[in-house]
Amino acid sequence: MEWTIYTARGITRKNSNGIFSFDSSQIEDGLKIGLMPQILINAGVGVQVVQDLAKYLNRKNFLKKVPIQITAHGFGEFGNDYKNIEQTIETIIDINKNSKKSLVSEVVFHGGSVFDFESLSRWHNDDKINSPIDLIEYTKIVEFARMNLSEYVSYASRFGIDVILENVGQVNFAVAKSLDEKTEEQRRDPRWGNTLWLPEKAQYGDIGCVYDLEKLTKGYLCIDTEHLHQSAEYSRTHNLENFPKELTEAEKLILRNHGVFIREKEPVLFEKAIDPFELIRGLSGRIKIAHLGGQVSQIYDDNGVMKIGSHMPITFVGQDNEYYDDKELLHRHNCARETGMYKYLSALNDAGCRKAVLELHLGNVYTGPKWQHYNKVSLDNVSKIIRSFK
């Protein structure tokens, strides 16, 4: 079975009055270089946009069963309610109803943080606070998420739609808690220069990172390799082998069932360092789609400037990458990127995954020559690895 490679594509443009309308230009740009669209759609985009999207997909007969990604995430999905997921499912149902055929069969989402940024940022200067929740609160959140997910998976399946859970990163390796704390070099960085970074001390706030995926859903999964890489990077330091604990029976149960040690005001710990490739192969048959990016490290020092390393172009040995100033660092990262991408794609292939989405962040560039160049380079590198499996 052949692999299909997608790229994340928006479908709206905003006029001078702030009104959104349907725009297919991003989809068309991806198709020009051989990338199918994973459509990014916000809940509540408007009936007209949905109707126009359905008409467009009907005209493009080869665009069948394209996946949709919920773009809004963060506080609320796991910690409060699931309105965003519910609205997006209803949007997909409307798209299919307005079509002559089932155009969309998959919706991918992740739950995001159980706490908002304002709450997390208040802990920034307190060296003692790490996990803001205790075992009781953690258990409540996981059970709430599991029950809601089960309901929406069941509901969507009646309309031929798979609700797919994406893993999230374990920790935010942050270097500033606000834009004001950034240096001028960081502000000018085309990669994440305007991002509001979470504080280092906010080590916990997400569920659905690694082992708890099994508990949250019995359905299909999307494995974001960069998120998994972040969790693995975190786990190499933060594990019970490095920080032994006397565990209560309740903590042993959580560790056995969810793979993490949770104790309020202490760091979240894994039992041992995570092997991401072993984890992927253990989910064989359940991974519907993967998200790919060129991350080597979540944060990297490029000639004294700290940069966020996620959603990098997937460049390999000998290839240029304008997001590095240090050429020696670029070479080392290209080597590590090529080796790591082979291992991730090999594990995903063994697990039965045959769809992958390129997730590259190129500043505010979502189309045009630079976008096409880096996505084409990334597509060629990923495709070369996939061809080697045959």
Image: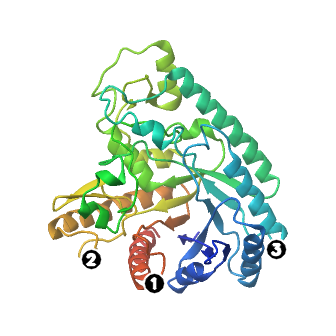
The residue closer to the viewer here, 126 or 169, is 126
Q: Rounded to the nearest whole Å, what is the CA distance between mark 3 and mark 1?
A: 30 Å
Residue 353 image point, x, y percent: 55, 59
Q: Quadrant of residue 317?
A: bottom left
Residue 8 image point, x, y percent: 54, 69
Q: Which residue is mark 3?
A: 99
Q: Rounded to the nearest whole Å, what is the CA distance between mark 2 and mark 1?
A: 20 Å
Whether residue 247 can be seen here: yes
Who's the residue at 39% across and 24% down the image? Answer: 265
Q: Quadrant of the N terminus?
A: bottom right
Amino acid of disc 3 = Ser
The residue closer to the viewer here, 145 or 122, is 122
Q: Is residue 135 left or right of residue 339?
A: right
Amino acid of disc 2 = Gln
Q: Which numbered mark, 3 or 1, is in the foreground of this view?
A: 1
Q: Earlier in the sequence, mark 3 or mark 1?
A: 3
The residue closer to the viewer here, 365 or 36, is 365
Q: Rounded to the nearest whole Å, what is the CA distance between mark 3 and mark 2?
A: 43 Å
Q: Which mark is residue 368?
A: 1
Amino acid of disc 1 = Gly
Q: Quadrant of residue 127?
A: top left
